[in-house]
Image (spheres, coloured by chain):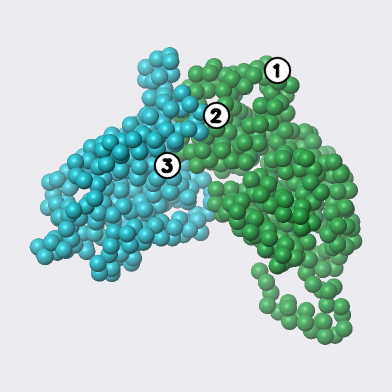
Amino acid sequence: MAGELFFQYLIAGLTYGTIYAVVGMGFNIIYNATGIINFAQGEFVMLGGMTAVSLHAFLPLPLAIVVAVLVTMVVGALIEVTFIRWLSRPSVLRMIIITIGISILIREAALLLWGQDVRALPYFTGNEITSIAVGGARISPQVLWTLGACAGLVVLVTAFFRFTMLGRQMRACAANRVAASLCGLPTRNLITLSFVLSAGMGALAGCVVSPITQTQYGIGTGLAIKGFTVAILGGLGNSLAAVAAGLLLGIIESFSVSLLPTAFKDAVSIAVLLAILFARPSGLFGARAATRP
Amino acid sequence: MRNPILPLVTCLLALVSTPARAADPIKVGAILSVTGPASFLGAPESKTIQMFAEDLNAKGGLLGRKVEVIVKDSGGSPEKALSFAKQLIEEDKVLAILGPSTSGETMQIKGLCEEQKTLLISCAAAEVIVNPVAKWVFKTPQKDSDAVVKIFQHMKSKGLTKVGVLSSNTGFGKAGKEQLEKLAPNFGVQIAASEVYDKAATDLTAEVTKMKGAGVQAIVNWSIEPAQALVIKNARQIGLTIPIYQSHGFGNINYVKAAGAAAEGVIFPAGRLLVADVLSDKHPQKQVLVAYKKGYEARFKEDVSTFGGHGYDAMLLLAEAVKKAGSTDKEKVRAALEGLTGLVGTAGVFKMSATDHNGLDVEAFELLTVKDGRFVTLAQ
């Protein structure tokens, strides 16, 4: 393969990878606080993107994104308070089914609210055809924005869970909710907070990927599947691992296209996922066992 | 919307000796993907068909009877389309089914309509719907093969011989790909690379990179999903400046908006509805197109699309066939529909026959392009 094409495939992989990574990271917050996978995460991504597109009609882009993230955070809080908070001892399975129900609810509400049209935020830098030359290949500046958002979020999230009291409390809450509440931690508020943060991350992801992927009411599910895949692949709960796994998966998919028909792209990525999970059930970078103690 | 007083009035009329049957509405079923991934087809089709029926009823209906359209939203699912088709035929006893919106759904219910001797006027594009001809099945959009011919004719005139094909993994994409592969040799065109991508694709950089690697002189993309906008964005982002052709599925201004600057210069075949305003006054379709466009845009406050036009044509064909047959006997209406010629619709001038249940030829297409974010006819 010519060097130029090689780089171009690598960049295509980076493009896929950053999308997966930035979506995948959102799964980790709620997992870190509750130990469940929030299957409505993709809908937070969609909500963020759609809200920002609507707001951008009368707000400047940065402000539209900030407000969209805040709005989605409020939605995240409302969802938790309405559907999850009142459960006295929710089992993991029950909470997962509830989140699936919520995802359908949000999707249908978005369909009613925005209709079925595809929209997109403008590119943060340049326009649809702007690209930067890198070693003979070209990359859209939006990919760099997404990569930047991933990096920023990794630093913030890691710092939050490692070094702040609130973050540690949330981890305690995930490890053992009964023990955490016996120690005087407001576990219910912590779980609400985890939904708020997770919704915010999803919404931000939805905004930065919107110029690339375009946004439609139903886009959340597809993005969430890939995001979920990389969250698992990296090892649940670890944001940096999700980014690494996302980029890895994206690059594998991109190079699989160079060798095989595109139709095999997902087959290749799923095969890789299975192979890795057989060898390392806790994910590439996961230290803990996949099942909670 | 059903008027609650209407059944009462009907009953009263029945009592006052008028034959009850005369006031019964003519029931027409419509299976359309109003929501879901193909909603950009089904939503305008549904609006158009209901608008057509309302206008028709305001003018006294058909044969002195009101037309009642029963719309079923299939969400683009062939399985749902099939169960709705059964319901419409067996329970609602409809005269005809309009739609479905997509080729996959149409093929799923084609056999049932043949079996049950119920008219099916599809709004989907694939050639296989009417080729080979099925007695009870018609379709309103132009043929895929004619769109392909239109594109290849243009390529030939520009001396393009080595092309790459991208298509989505839907009935529409598959049918288009087959036609492209079949007809390419007739125009001296070689398909150097062909890729099928997922209909929910969110980025296609790797696929267009493959096209670049194959050294093609032009790309043809065949799909109806938002991915159409991705193809052109990603191709331009990696620095490909070759001509990009799209199918008639590109005839929705939302895709132009989604692709922004990348949409400029894209070439695609489409019906003349998109350029109705700039069409010559002498063109036979001018009047129909402008009337539909104005009516739709005034009522629904959104841009008209060729897909809604397919719904318009389906309803138009049925209404004209019923008028011509002077009856709602299924067989008589079917025969009348098969004999309609010179009927001006939004997609072209229909010339139905026993061997052609589409009735449109390559002249129904015009090559369009995008200039300053608007559809314009391509200057030859």
Q: At 25% from the left edge and 69% from the top edge, which residue is drawn? A: A88
Q: Which of B317 and B282 is in front in this view?
A: B317
Q: What element carries label 1?
A: loop
Q: Which of A91 and A33 is in front in this view?
A: A91
User: Could you tell whether B240 is left or right of B114 in the image?
Assistant: left
User: Could you tell whether B330 is left or right of A144 in the image?
Assistant: right
Q: At 13% from the left edge and 49% from the top edge, which residue is drawn? A: A164
Between the residue at mark 2 and the residue at mark 1, the CA separation in whole angstroms equals: 20 Å
Outermost residue toward the bottom in this view: B15
Q: Nearer the viewer, residue A46 or A25?
A: A25
Q: At 46% from the left edge and 27% from the top edge, which residue is drawn? A: A257
Q: Is mark 2 on a helix, strand or loop?
A: strand
Rendering coords of residue A210 (x, y %): 42, 42
Between the residue at mark 2 and the residue at mark 3, the CA separation in whole angstroms equals: 24 Å
Looking at the rendered structure, the kind of residue marked 3 is Ser
Looking at the rendered structure, the kind of residue marked 1 is Gly
Task: Tell me if I can see residue B371 in this picture.
Answer: no
* Shown colour of chain B: green
Task: Tell me if I can see residue B341 in this picture.
Answer: yes
Q: Which chain carries label 3?
A: A
Rendering coords of residue B152 (x, y %): 70, 25
Q: Mark 1 lies on which chain?
A: B
Q: Quadrant where the N terminus of chain B lies? A: bottom right
Looking at the rendered structure, the kind of residue marked 2 is Glu
- Answer few, some or many: residues within 10 Å of disc 2's Cα (few below 14, many 20 plus, some between 14 and 19): many
* Residue bearing the label numbered 1: B188
Q: Mark 2 lies on which chain?
A: B
* Chain letter tied to cyan: A
- Say which label, 2 or 1, has the lower sequence index: 1
* Residue bearing the label numbered 3: A210
Q: Which numbered circle lies on residue B195?
A: 2
Outermost residue toward the top in this view: A2
